[in-house]
Every structure is written in structure tokens, then in C-alpha cells.
């Protein structure tokens, strides 16, 4: 495992933990990095983690105006 994949795995774990505690949360990429991950993870690693979680069906993003919000996947919303 490379240090990059270890960092992504760490971000994935933190995102899963945050969304388990706050299942209705939604934020921009920058907000996820700042508030969900407490600025512990670089923005590019956060983006890669969110992309992996989206590919796995765990996260989704929605467009709100010109912003893109990330949230836990919600069926039926």
C-alpha cells in the first residue's frame, strides 16, 4: 500500500465515521475537508476518497446552484 492509498483509506474511514454520526450532513469538497476531516487531510486526497465512496455507492454529490454538495447516498430523495 502506498502512502497515497493509505491517506485515501484514512480519509474514507473518517468520512464514513462522520456520516455515520451525521447522516443528513452535506457539504462542498472544501467543507468536507475543513469540517468533516478537521483539515487533517489534503484537498486532493479528500477528493479521491469521495470519488471512491461515490463509485462504491456510499456517497453522492448534488448540484445546488453553482456548488456541488457531497452527502451520504440517499435512496428515494
Image (spheres, rainbow, N blue to C red):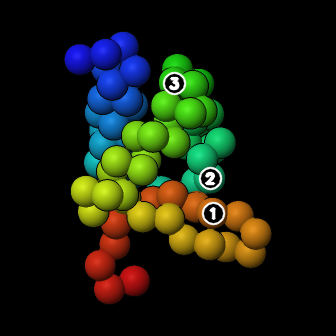
**Residue that numbered label 3 is attached to:** 41
Could you say which disc has been placed on residue 27 in the image?
none
- Secondary structure state at the residue bearing disc 1: strand
**Residue that numbered label 2 is attached to:** 28
Q: Position of residue 27 (x, y in %)?
A: 58, 54
**Residue that numbered label 1 is attached to:** 68
User: Image point 57% across, 25% down: which residue?
Assistant: 42
| Residue density around tag 3, few if under 14, some if 14–19, many if 20 or more, within 10 Å | some
User: Image point 50% across, 36% down: which residue?
Assistant: 46
User: Extreme right residue here?
Assistant: 66
Mark 3 and mark 1: Cα distance apart in space: 19 Å
Q: Is residue 13 visible?
A: yes
Name the N-terminal-most of marks 3 and 1: 3
Instruction: Verify CB contact (< 8 Å) between mark 2 and mark 1.
Output: yes
Foreground of the two, 63 or 38: 63
Q: Position of residue 26 (x, y in %)?
A: 52, 58
Mark 3 and mark 2: Cα distance apart in space: 15 Å
| Residue density around tag 1, few if under 14, some if 14–19, many if 20 or more, within 10 Å | some
User: Image point 29% across, 78% down: which residue?
Assistant: 75
Amino acid at each position: 500500500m502506498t502512502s497515497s492509498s493509505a491517506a485515501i483509506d484514512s480519509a474514507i474511514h473518517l468520512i464514513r465515521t462522520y456520516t455515520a454520526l451525521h447522516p443528513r450532513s452535506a457539504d462542498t469538497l472544501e467543507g468536507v475537508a475543513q469540517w468533516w476531516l478537521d483539515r487533517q487531510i489534503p484537498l486532493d486526497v479528500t477528493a479521491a476518497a469521495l470519488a471512491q465512496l461515490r463509485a462504491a455507492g456510499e456517497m453522492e454529490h448534488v448540484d445546488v446552484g453553482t456548488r456541488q454538495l457531497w452527502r451520504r447516498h440517499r435512496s428515494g430523495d
